[in-house]
Image: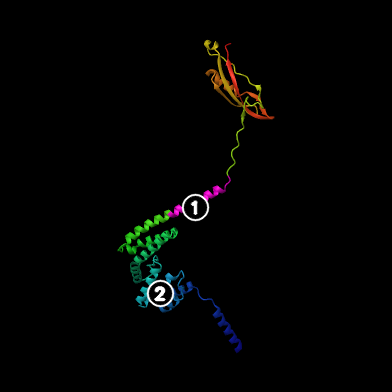
Amino acid sequence: MMRLASLALAAFALLGQQRPPAAAGDDLSAAKALYASGAYEEALTKLASVPPDGSSLDTANEYRALCYLALGRTPDASRQIDELVSRSPLFKMSENEVPPRLVAMFHEARKKLLPSLVREGYSRAKSSFEQKSYSTAVSQLKNVLQLATDDDLAEDPPPGMADIKLFAESFLKLAETEITNAEKAAADAAAATAAANTPAPPPPPLPDPIYSDADKDVKPPVDINRKMPEWRPPDQASQRMEFRGVLRVVIDKSGAVELAAIIQAITPRYDQILVDAAKQWTFKPATKDGQPVRYQQLIQVVLSPK
């Protein structure tokens, strides 16, 4: 029995050794609970386990300052606040949950540290701009402007802060313009590449040629229906006159008239009547090598007295 008990104790001890270490969030939660219960030294011990590069580091600094302040270790609390502001100048303390004394220390630390942080941030942003890292510069400049206009600096702006703000705004506009131009240039280049890789559309087909009696290898069209409209002189004088003109017709490959036009006027009373009638004419189409082709005819028109 004694041997079994010893083995059991050893097993439990081994399990305890193999238990994974608590996460940083667990240590922070435990530290908060210890602080709330007044166990400030124990809370500081737990806060020592929070990784120095974790996302909870700002809160850990805040609770260390709270613990040191509760223990009467004001210089240590002040150092924690300075560290917090230096690392995260935009950090906002929950003033409803923090003692007024620590809130006052926090704002005093920001008033003391923000001017140098603004200058350092502006210097980094300007360097990024000069290196043409415009996206980085835009982010940095926006942070600089947010800090330069912070409430903790508004009451008593330090010397040179207005100039830094003015320069930061100018560089921000320039950086944003450079980004816009780069994006437009990239879009234009992509469009040009796409256009270069797109095959050109085929040229439109050439219109069918129009032949005439000058083409000796073409058989001219044969009339099927080419009835001339009746000429009715409007007065006695016109009845005794002769009128001459020329009508142009283009006959398509089906034998229909696709175009009729007066190219030498006959008489205004007859010209339009003739054109309207010619559009109704039909032919056996002209042929070239046995194939129907388009053909134009110039028709001399003579209106003689009855």
Q: Residue furthest bottom?
A: 2
Q: From this viewpoint, is residue 84 visible?
A: yes
Q: Nearer the viewer, residue 227 or 183?
A: 183
| Image coordinates for residue 299, horizontal then vertical, percent | 60, 21
Instruction: Give the residue type at disc 2.
Output: Arg
* Residue count near mark 1 (Cα–Cα under 10 Å), binned few <14, some 14–19, many ≥20: few
Rendered image: mark on residue 186: 1
Residue at image mark 2:
64
Q: Is residue 138 left or right of residue 290?
A: left
Residue at left offset 57%, top offset 84%: 10
Nearest-to-viewer mark from 1 and 2: 1
Q: Earlier in the sequence, mark 1 or mark 2?
A: 2
Tell me where the magenta segment starts and ends, as one range. Answer: 178-199
Q: Residue at x 61, y 86 (%)?
A: 4
| Main secondary structure type of the part rendered in magenta | helix
Near mark 2 (Cα within 10 A), the count class, few <14, some 14-19 or many ≥20, is many
On whether residue 187 falls in the magenta region, the answer is yes
